[in-house]
Image: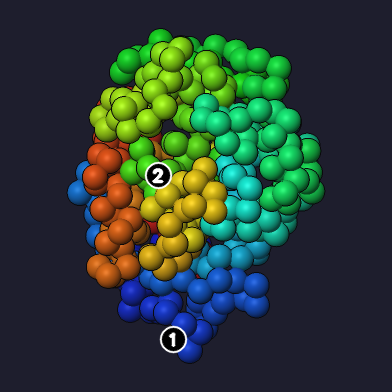
Amino acid sequence: MSNQEVSRRTVLKTATLVGASAITPMFAIPAKAEETIMAEKVQTPVIGSERIEPKTYKGSYAKVYFSPVISEEALIKLYNLVNEGIYGKVAIKLHTGEKHGPNIIPRPLVKALQSTIPDSVIVETNTLYEGDRYTTKDHRDTLKVNGWDFCPVDIMDEHGFVNLPVNNGFHLKEVAMGKSIVDYDSMLVLTHFKGHAMGGFGGSMKNIAIGCASGQEGKRQVHGVGEKVPEDWNKWPAKEVFMENMADSAKAVIDHFSKRITYINILRNMSVDCDCAGTAAAKPTIRNIGILASTDLLAIDQASCDLVYGSPAHDKHDLVERIESRHGLRQLSAMAEKDMGNPHYRLIVVD
């Protein structure tokens, strides 16, 4: 039943992925795949893009492809479903993490996918906080430690920044991005979906909103801090203002690339903490869910949240608490208000 559009309720009837013995042949997991658990049909409290069932809606909708299997084969298959706008020199925007980060996307998955994309490189930017990626020199050392040396890695703000305009933003008129972002024809946003200390969750929007902004100028703009950055990040602007600033920054990136940008979210090892926490990140308490792919930024982050909220209560409690306590769902409504995605999406399960 490859690429068949099914409801999440149908998927539940077909298979509950709690262990190999419970898997039906349709969702048999290859040798290198990871165990996942299927979520129930639940809509996140904040709706930026409403999930619709097959044959119940006649208007346009974003397609979000979903595989409950986390494997090299599944990742490549989903990418090939959403790569129609990807060509030329390709930037793979990846959060490469602090040294020895326990939850980052496994290198074999990224290496397998990158090898199928001609003229592609991983892109990153330096950090605003002082850590393993604060300077270009330290950042390159961290890349090597974490195993991101199987292909070229461009630290886009190594040689400065370029201002990209924010059209009809909430607060920002422009955002300083890593200078070399303009050297790429297209971008694949490859995201480890997880919690975040300030954003509540980090999905595709956060990956480009903060991840493409230059380490100093751009990230100060997105975080809403001036030249003197408060040492205690709890004193930085947060909640709605921060989410809106992220939406502004992400909008600058998607407007720049237009149809030449696509998104993949990997829902595994979802700690309440971002990969920028490194080895200090809290251990995940929610089980792995799978991989999502779409050409629609809002739809993929909405679908990711819907699958988290649809997880068993004892699994999702910590991550949901992190999302809501930081007002993270404002990311979804902010994107919807700025027309950064289709208000309807369909979840298409790919075996």
Quarter of the figure with residue 151: top right
Can you identify the residue that label 1 sits on? 22
In the image, residue 211 sits, relative to residue 323, either above or below, namely: above
Residue name at image x 26 percent, y 53 percent = 321
88 lies left or right of 161: right
Element type at mark 2: strand
Within 10 Å of disc 2 (Cα), the crowding (few <14, some 14-19, many 20+) is many
- Decide which of tag 1 and tag 2 comes sooner along the chain: 1
Cβ atoms at labels 1 and 2 below 8 Å apart: no
Q: Is 339 placed above or below 109 here?
A: above
Residue 251 position in % (x across, y down): 43, 24
Name the foreground residue: 313 vs 321: 321
Circle 1 SS class: helix
Q: Quarter of the image holding residue 87?
A: top right
Residue marked by disc 2? 196
The answer to whether 218 is drawn above or below residue 298 in the figure is above
For the residue marked with disc 1, what is the amino acid?
Answer: Ala
Q: Amino acid at mark 2?
A: His
Q: Residue furthest front?
A: 231
Q: Position of residue 64 (x, y in %)?
A: 44, 51
Q: Residue at coordinates 63% horizontally, 53% vertically from top-left?
A: 100
Q: Is residue 146 left or right of residue 238?
A: right
Q: Which mark is residue 253?
A: none
Instruction: Please tell me whether mark 1 or mark 2 is closer to you in this view.
Output: 2
Picture residue at 49% right of the left edge, 61% below the top: 268
Q: Is residue 214 visible?
A: yes
Q: Position of residue 33 (x, y in %)?
A: 60, 71
**Residue 63 image offset from top left, x and y in percent:** 43, 48
